[in-house]
Image: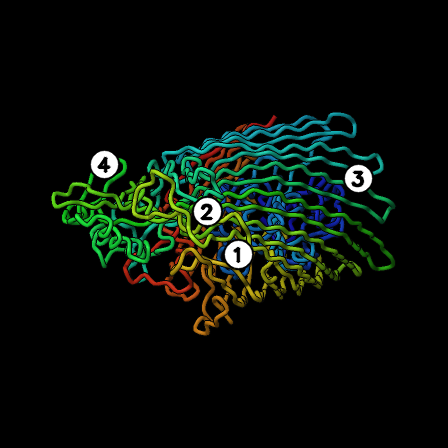
Amino acid sequence: MSAAVILPAAPAMAQVQPEAPPPAADQAPQPAAPPAAEDEQEIVVTGQTSRNRPLITASADITLATREDIDRRAPRSTADMLELVPGIFVEGTAGELSNNYSVRGLQGGGQRFVQLEEDGMPVLYQGGGADFFFSQDLTIDRLEAVKGGSSGVLTVNGAGATINFISRRPNFDRFEGSARVTGYDYGLKRADLYLSAPIAENLAFNIGGYFQSSPGVRRNPFDYEGYRVKAMLEYRFDSGGFIRLTGKIGDLKTAYYAGMPYTYNDGEPGAVPGLDPQKDNIGGDAFARTSVPVSTFVEADGFRDFRLSEGVRAKTKQVRLDFEKPVTDGLELFARARYLDFSYDFNGLFPGSGTGNAGLASAVDYLTPGASPLDGIQVGGVGFLQRGALAFPAAARFGIRNLRTGVVLGANQTAELNALNGNGFLQQTVLNHDYVEGHDFGANLGFRWEAEGDGFRNSLTAGVMYYDVSRWQNQSAVAPVVNDVRNNSDIYDIVALDAGNNVIGTLSDNGLISYGDWGVGIRERKDSSISVYINDELAIGDNLNIDAGIRWESVDATFRDGNGAAVNQPVPPGVGGIVRTVGPTWDGTYTVRRATQEKTAWTVGANYRITPNLAVYARYALGFQTNNVDPITEIELYEAGVRLQLGRWFNGSATVFRTNFNDQFYNFIDPADPTRQQAFLADLSTKGVEIDVVVRPVEWFSVNFIGVFQDPTLSNLRLDGVAQPTYDGNRPERTPAQLYTITPTIRLPNGLGEVYARYKYIGKIFADSGNGVALPGYGVTGVGVSLNLTERLQVSFDADNIFDVMGLTEGNPRQGQTQNADSGFFYARGITGPSFGGSVTLKF
């Protein structure tokens, strides 16, 4: 991986001249690079619009990760690959998708400001959720990233960073292919295939993708399977340029993990007895399928099924067209467009949501009126157990009934209740069923004009970007159950008992204790965006480069929010329990909000090469993030950096930065009333330094260090418009002050392969903006080996978290902005314990 100039003299970081690199769609066309000469510099296409501009001359913070860097990281999710970019903080604990990532001090979950691109076009216009529809495979050649700088000008909704995954181009010279099989100890089985060949003199194709089956990284009785396939057909014009058609299709199911309960003593997290936080998963057979009552305007029969057995199912259909053509020696035209039809059916468990830490309590307390967490659930204005007493006046006490075994335990059986699963706990777990479908059309048309004269070279790029986006969401029937605290947990009904502990009535409905806890849940968003942009890059002599760019965007947005009925519908016939309505009821109508907003992003930067191997640069950028009808968030970035290489010995960069996130806005669930959302609005500022260094004392050994050390702070925080001055100066939630990775690598003789290790450290984060719950820093160690058994056969092996470190992310985002763990327990999302696996790759 490199953020500085790379020379062939450094074997572990050898120069990679892109093989006819595809231009970034939001950047100028990039023709095929000429054959590498011994003194040529590393060429990147992301974040710059000049042809074949060496990275050392860049006036932005740019990072390159080659295919070898990606394989060395052995990513198990898209989020894992983002850890190759200094300054990106990843909370990669959700599984393969729906992970959180942020940049330069933006609070955790701020992935909307990080735009993921494939071949220069955003995976999704809005940014967030892109990892549902993109994953790496053998069709990906490398990763390029630019943080701040030109990112907010050359793409939409990427003011914080652009991460560009660049595909392999079809081979016009010969047939080539590769196949890979991958397996891991937790049950992942995957097969990849890539093929490419010429069809005619100027026509070639490639196709690649994978099929996999996996239960996920935690213990799980369900196995999720799926595939993704991408194909390209490219025609090259005799006079230069090309036209390329790309198609992608996928249907992939994956596991998802939210929080788990942990102990909290003197600020140190620990395991709840009976639950292994490194491997266990409360989800399992009991959650395979649950029918939840819902408005008949959502489902005609009044039921909506939650199916953990389906996991998260993401479907992708995409077609894309790219065109480039030189008009004169200095003028090139480019046009590209892609249409994505997508959907995902999200079935995820959220323990501790709504009730937060208070929902984790002893089974004895659950059955004790006045002490029970169930008392917070109002049924007709009366607490849950109190309503149960009114419904079953003959009851002597309450109890729980295991839905799997049928075993009943009464409130008077305290010894048995306290021994339940070795911890005596029950908890409330929300069944979050979130279905989204939509389309995302994007296009970029423009030109690049290059000219040079006596002592200068200039590259001017201008274009128009258009996006038309629509997504419809059904997050209705979100409801909680009562379950125990163990792997593959059981769900319990709350029952009314007579004096002999015989069941005389059931308060819950197959474990469900309420319905529609996150509100009506029917929404539709539409965005129509047009941007006009200009970027100019001027080289004066051999040492000075000056860049400037500007983008104006206008967005017409519509938000349709499903209305709740004045009177909630009754539950369908046959539904048991004391809750007799489906909760917030969609009445089939919408409240419609519309907004047209305009904003301008601009940037200016300069790079000066003091020597051929030493350069300094500085950059200012003002970018923004659109938020449908909500206020546009502005991001201001200052940065200055130095890039240095000393032959084989040293290759590195350092960047100091200051970032101001003005009016950062998002909605979150109100823990006091989960059916409504609270509005968070605050200013964030961060100052820090990023480092990316490779030291190679001998030919066969190198050490790569990447990291960021930063000081992020909150100010002017408002909750639902009400100022919260006590938060001023706090650390933004889920944001570390330091994170770094150290990767030593040993090259084996005679090209046999390499052996490497990786140590990743994540500093302390806070679970809340009030900084009430601190999650301690942690370091994770991994090791790996890659062996070239023959020129065509490669075997690799890697192991992660080999010392079984406990590392926590998130906390419980649904518990609010001021949290505590006074009970001695809290919820967080943790990394997994030791895991290992490998792959076998055959090239042909």
Residue 507 coordinates in the image, percent (x, y)? 27, 46
Q: Residue at x 48, y 45 (%)?
A: 434
Q: Which mark is residue 13?
A: none
Q: Earlier in the sequence, mark 2 or mark 3?
A: 3
**Front in this rendered view, residue 607 or 435:** 435
Q: Are marks 2 and 3 in contact (CB under 8 Å)?
A: no
Name the residue carrying label 1.
110
Residue 822 coordinates in the image, percent (x, y)? 29, 63
Q: Are marks 1 and 2 in contact (CB under 8 Å)?
A: no
Please say if 431 is above or below 371: above
Residue 298 coordinates in the image, percent (x, y)? 48, 43
Q: Earlier in the sequence, mark 3 or mark 4?
A: 3
Q: Earlier in the sequence, mark 1 or mark 2?
A: 1
Name the residue carrying label 4.
406
Name the residue carrying label 3.
241
Q: Nearer the viewer, mark 2 or mark 3?
A: 2
Q: Amino acid at mark 4?
A: Gly
How packed mark 1 is, by other alpha carbons closer than 10 Å (few <14, some 14-19, many 20 or more), is: some
Q: Earlier in the sequence, mark 1 or mark 3?
A: 1
Please say if 445 is above or below 604: above
Name the residue carrying label 2.
476
The Cα atoms of the two marked residues, 4 and 2, are separated by 30 Å
The Cα atoms of the two marked residues, 1 and 3, are separated by 38 Å
Q: In the rendered image, is residue 362 in sight?
A: no
Q: Earlier in the sequence, mark 4 or mark 2?
A: 4
Instruction: Work out which quarter of the rendered image holds the C terminus and state it.
Output: top right
Q: Please tell me in which quadrant of the rendered image residue 625 appears.
A: bottom right
- View extreme (bottom): residue: 725
Q: Please tell me in which quadrant of the rendered image residue 179 appears.
A: top right
